[in-house]
Amino acid sequence: MSSQPTVRTRAVFLDIDGTYAEHGLAPEAHVDAVRAARRLGHLVFVCTGRPLSMVPARILDAGFDGTVTGAGARVEVNGVVLRDTRFNPDLARRLVEILDANDVAYILEAPESLHGRTGVDQRLRNVLGPVFAERHNSGSGQDSAEDPLEDILGPMQYGDDLRSESFAKISCFDSPVPLRTLLADFGNEVGLIPSSLSALGEGAGEIFMTGVHKAVGIQVVEAHLGLDREDIVAIGDSANDIEMLAYAGVGIAVEGGHPDVLAVADRFTPGPDSNGVALAFAELGLLD
C-alpha cells in the first residue's frame, strides 16, 4: 500500500510595490494565488519597505501569515509582534535636524503612523502626483480610481517639530542637496538606498538603520517558525529586495527590476500587469 507524497511546505515573502501590487493594487490573480497556496499549507508573508501604517487593508485582505514591514524593522507572525526596531532617539533627532535644515521633503515611518512636517502634504502632491500619473498612464493594465498618494497621506500626522518622534525609516522625496551628501557625516550609522521612483533622482531615497533589511526580518520569522532556509522563497524588484533575494533558498526577481536584484536572483517573473506572482507560484508548484 503506497502512501501519499508529502507536500513540501514553502514560506514565501512578497514585496508589495512593483511585485505583488502596482499603484497600490494587486491583480485578482495574485490574490487568488496567495489564498490557494495557503489552502495547500504553504506560508505567505508580506515583506515590504512600507511601514505597517502604509499597508492598506485592500492588500492585507488577501490573507497572509504575517508581515515584515519597514524593510525588516518590524515583524509580525499570526498577530504576534516579534520585532519592532526604531532609530536611537539621539540619532533620530540629528537626522531630522539636518533634513529640516536643508529643506528636505520627508516622511518619518513608524508602524502606527507616518509623521510629516506641516505643509509637506502639498509638497508631496506637487512632487509625486506627476510621477504616479506618468507611471499609471504608461500602461499598468489596471483601471482604478485608487489614488496611490492616499496610502501616504491617509495615515499621516503633521507637526512643526518632529525631533522627538519614534520611527524606523525615513523616506525622502525632494531634497535640494543629494541625500548622500547630506548623510556623509553620519558615516556607517545609517544606510541609504535610492527611491523606487527613479525619476526623483538623487534628492530622493530611503534612510534606514544600518544592519536592518528584509533578510533580517525573514530570519526572525525563520527562527520563530523553525523554517528551513532552502524552503524560503522571496520575490521582489527594488533595491531594498537585494538582501532578501540573496538570502532566500529561491530568490525571484521581477523582470525589469533593479539591476542588483536581477544579479542575485535564481529565477525571474513578469510584473504585476502580467500576473508575475501567480506565474511564479505555479512554476514552484505552490498551487497544485
Image (spheres, rainbow, N blue to C red):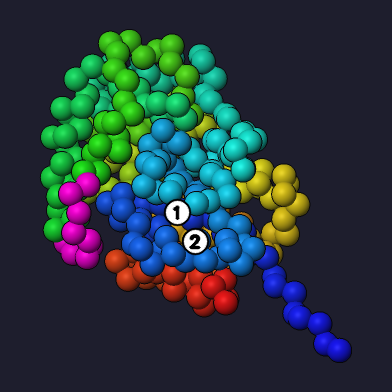
Residue 85 lies within the magenta run:
no
Amino acid on which the number 2 mark rests in the picture: Val
For the residues bearing labels 1 and 2, Cβ distance under 8 angstroms: yes
For disc 2, the marked residue is 34
Seen from this angle, which residue lies furthest front? 1
Amino acid on which the number 1 mark rests in the picture: Ala
Rendering coords of residue 238 (x, y %): 40, 54
Disc sitting over residue 246 in the figure: none
Residue at x 52% of width, y 77% of height: 283
- Crowd around label 1: few <14 · some 14–19 · many ≥20 (10 Å): some
Query: Does 240 sit above or below residue 248?
Result: above
For disc 1, the marked residue is 62
Query: Does 93 sit above or below residue 57?
Result: above
261 lies left or right of 243:
left
Q: Quadrant of residue 4?
A: bottom right
The secondary structure that most of the magenta stretch takes on is loop
Residue at x 39% of width, y 59% of height: 19
203 lies left or right of 268:
left
Q: CA distance from mark 1 to mark 2?
A: 7 Å
Rendering coords of residue 106 (x, y %): 30, 28
Q: Nearer the viewer, residue 163 or 68?
A: 68
Seen from this angle, which residue lies furthest right? 1
> In this picture, which residue range is highlighted in magenta?
138-146
Judge whether residue 215 can be spotted in this image.
no
Q: Secondary structure at mark 1?
A: loop
